[in-house]
Image (cartoon, helix red, strand yellow):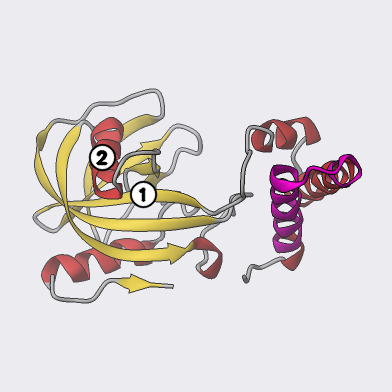
Amino acid sequence: MTSNNPWTDWAEQIRAIAQNGLTFSRDDFDIERYHQLQSIAHEMTALLTDAPLDKVNHYFLPEKGYCTPKVDLRGGVFLEDKILLVRERSDGCWTLPGGWADVCEPPSTGVEREVLEESGYTARAIKLVALRDTQLHPYHPRSPHHIYKMIFLCELTGGSPKENIEISEIGFFDVNDLPELSEGRTLPRDIKLLLEHKNALELPTGFD
């Protein structure tokens, strides 16, 4: 794994070791040590992100079981050559509609659901354009989680713009005149890649 700060990687790896140990260990002394490792990882994350420790603890404590990367789904929906973007209330910036994959839901169905929930538009996933390890690309600010990002090209099928608790605006934008992006979620290169695949569906899916 690579990042701008190797301490962030080390904190994440320690947290994963602790979570896996708590999942599989049956020895009381080992469990106590894994809890100590978990606390150290959370303290490191709080220091590195300048976040309150209680917020970091709350963010990670629901995590149980074997630690694996999370899956983020993003949908690229075009109206002619304009790309659908939604504006996040959390940072005021724009992104491809998307979010976490849900359990027991195929990723293609998940990205269609996310497009509808975040924009009000209906769309059909027609191609997986890229599968990215976000740690190998300049997404920022970086999430404390290790994330795989699945970027789908989708076909617009209907609907109308609809704001919600997370999204304040919805619009289609010229790919050469994009608004300020929420670059922890979407990079300009993601949108450029989607346009390339829209114009040449035979291009291979990219992956890390």
Quick check: is 89 in the magenta stretch? no
* Residue at the far top in the pictured view: 165
Give the residue at x 35% y 43%: 98
Which quadrant of the rendered structure holds the C terminus?
A: bottom left
Residue 102: x and y in percent read 39, 38
Mark 1 closeness class: few <14, some 14–19, many ≥20 residues within 10 Å: many
Pick whichever of labels 1 and 2 is earlier in the sequence. Answer: 1
Helix, strand, or loop for circle 2? Answer: helix
Q: Is residue 52 visible?
A: yes
In the image, taking residue 175 as reference, residue 190 lies left or right, namely right
Residue on which the image places disc 2: 115
Q: Which residues are magenta?
A: 9-31
In the image, taking residue 38 as reference, residue 66 lies left or right, namely left
Q: Amino acid at mark 2?
A: Val
Q: Amino acid at mark 1?
A: Leu
Residue 54: x and y in percent read 77, 30
Query: Which of labels 1 and 2 is toward the front?
Result: 1
Is residue 66 shown above or below 128? above
Residue 205: x and y in percent read 27, 71
Helix, strand, or loop for circle 1? Answer: strand
Quick check: is 23 in the magenta stretch? yes
Q: Nearer the viewer, residue 187 or 53?
A: 53
| Label 1 – label 2 distance at C-alpha | 10 Å
Residue 155: x and y in percent read 12, 50
Residue on which the image places disc 1: 73
Magenta-highlighted stretch: main secondary structure?
helix
Q: Nearer the viewer, residue 182 or 70?
A: 70
Mark 2 closeness class: few <14, some 14–19, many ≥20 residues within 10 Å: many
Give the residue at x 50% y 68%: 137
